[in-house]
Image (cartoon, rainbow, N blue to C red):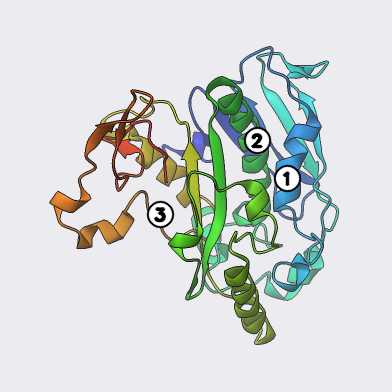
Amino acid sequence: NPGAESMSSFGRLFRVTTFGESHCAGVGCIVDGVPPRMQLTEAEIQVQLDRRRPGQAGAGSISTGRNEADAVQILSGTEKGFTLGTPIGLFVRNKDMRPNDYGDMSQIPRPSHADFTYQMKYGFRASSGGGRSSARETIGRVAAGAIAEKWLKDKYGVEIVSWVSAVGDVKCPDSEVNLDTISRDQVDQHMVRCPHIPTAETMTETIKAARAEEDSIGGVVSCVMRNVPIGLGEPCFDKLEAMLAHAMMSIPATKGFEIGSGFDGTKMRGSVHNDMFAINDQGKMVTETNYSGGVQGGISNGMPIV
C-alpha cells in the first residue's frame, strides 16, 4: 500500500499525525510545522476540546452516553507557554473505557461500520468501539486544529465558525444565518449547535424521536471562514477545495462535501452563477456574489470560504 506510511497523517508544511483507539489508554496527535515563539497553553487547546467532548450537560439525551473529561496534556514542543518550533505532542487520556460493551459484537461486523473492511484488509481489528475508525480519533484533529486556528487568527485575523445547519429533513433557514457576523457564541447557545433556536429545538425533537426508537439520524454541518488571505491552494491536484474535501471526507461517517453553491450550482445558468468583480468602499477587489465559496481555480480569492 503506497499510502500506508501516511494513513494517519495529513498536511505537509503543517503536518498532523493522530494516534490512539477508542478504548485504549488514550488518544492524541503529533503536530509538525508550528512556528516558534507562538504563545500556546493547554487551556487554549482545551477550549475546543470541551466543545467536542462527550458527556456535556444536557447533551447526553441527543448524543453518546460516554462521559469523558478529555483533558489535554502538552507533552512536547513548548516551554514557558511558547512554542519551540519542534514537534508538539498532545495527549488525552481515555477514562470511560468500556470494551466489554462490545463483547458480543467482536465476531459480528456491525452494518455500515468499518468492522468488516478492516478485518478483510488487515486480518485483524480493534473489536471494541471501532478502534481508529471511532470518533475518538477526531480528538487529535480538534487539538491540532486549535493550534492552526490560533496561528491563522494571530497572523491574518482568520475567523472560523461552524454550525449544524440540518438534522434529517429539518433545515436551518439560510435567512437566519448572517455569514458576516455569525459567531461561536451564537452557535454554542444551544446543545445542538444550531444558531437559530426555534430550528435547534425542532432538531432536538427529531434526534430524540429517532433515539426513542433505538435509531439515529444524520445531519449537515456548515462552515464559514472569514479574512482568509488570497492565494491559498495550488492548481490541479492540490486545489484548496480539494484539500478541504480530503480533510472533511476523512472524518468518520462523512458522506458528502460541498463548497459555495455546491450541487445547487448545477441548477443555475452560468450567467447567474458567475461571481462578478467589484471594488468595495475600502478599494479592495471583491465579488458581488459568492457562489464560488471563496475559491476560484483552486485558489482562495479573499472572499469568505463557505
Tell me how far mark 3 sits from mark 2, CA to CA.
22 Å
* Neighbourhood count class around disc 3 (C-alpha, 10 Å): few under 14, some 14–19, many 20 upward: some
The label on residue 146 is 2
Q: Earlier in the sequence, mark 3 or mark 1?
A: 1
Tag 2's secondary structure? helix
Q: Position of residue 96 (x, y in %)?
A: 84, 58
Q: Position of residue 270 (x, y in %)?
A: 15, 51
User: Could you say which is closer to the camera, residue 193 or residue 42?
Assistant: 193
Q: Position of residue 202 (x, y in %)?
A: 60, 76
CB within 8 Å, label 2 to label 1: yes
The label on residue 49 is 1
User: Could you say which is closer to the camera, residue 65 or residue 147?
Assistant: 147
Dividing the picture into quadrants, the one containing residue 100 is: bottom right
Camera sees residue 109: no
* Neighbourhood count class around disc 1 (C-alpha, 10 Å): few under 14, some 14–19, many 20 upward: many
In the image, what residue type sits under mark 1? Leu
In the image, what residue type sits under mark 3? Phe
Q: Earlier in the sequence, mark 3 or mark 2?
A: 2
Tell me how far mark 2 sits from mark 1, CA to CA.
9 Å
Residue at the image point whose x is 68% and y is 38% from the top = 143
Q: Is residue 232 left or right of residue 142?
A: left
User: Could you say which is closer to the camera, residue 115 or residue 121?
Assistant: 115
* Quadrant where the N terminus is found in the figure: top left
* Label 3 sits on residue: 257
Q: Position of residue 182 (x, y in %)?
A: 56, 48
The label on residue 236 is none
